[in-house]
Image: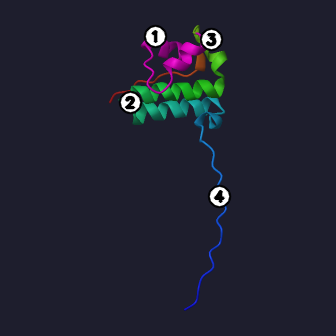
Amino acid sequence: MATTARKKSTPVKTSAYDVAEHLRTPEEMAAYLDAWLEEALDDVSGIARALGDIARAKGMSQVAKEAGLSRESLYRALSEGGNPSFATVLKVARALAVRLHAQPA
């Protein structure tokens, strides 16, 4: 019976995926938020995180300043489990230069 030599496997290097690194243009940011609004309308936390992803792509400090919020409160509001008020969502959307869109269901 032939024996098979086992080769040592080389460990695979992985890194965490960060969607914010891929949101480079206003069109990509708007499309990303629109996809969340379309596909996961009931996932309030997910939509807040999507706004947070876009804010990180644009620069959290800049977005916080333009929205009139502290950076820490913006991180907290748009983090997983965050529960931003609608006023905060509107301020952040304005600072991100994106519009929320309504259409008949």
Who comes first in sequence, dot 4 or dot 2?
A: 4
Instruction: State the separation of the CA atoms marked 1 and 3.
Output: 14 Å
Label 1, on which residue? 87
Q: Amino acid at mark 1?
A: Ala
Q: At numbered mark 2, what does the secondary structure look like: helix, strand or loop? A: loop
Label 4, on which residue? 11
Q: At numbered mark 3, what does the secondary structure look like: helix, strand or loop? A: helix
Dots 2, 3 in contact, CB < 8 A:
no
Who comes first in sequence, dot 2 or dot 3?
A: 2
Label 3, on which residue? 66
* Closer mark to the observer between disc 4 and disc 3: 4
Instruction: State the separation of the CA atoms marked 1 and 4.
Output: 47 Å
- Above/below status of 18 relative to 63: below
Per the rendered image, the range of residues in magenta is: 70-92
Q: Residues within 10 Å of mark 2 (few under 14, many from 20)?
A: few
Label 2, on which residue? 43
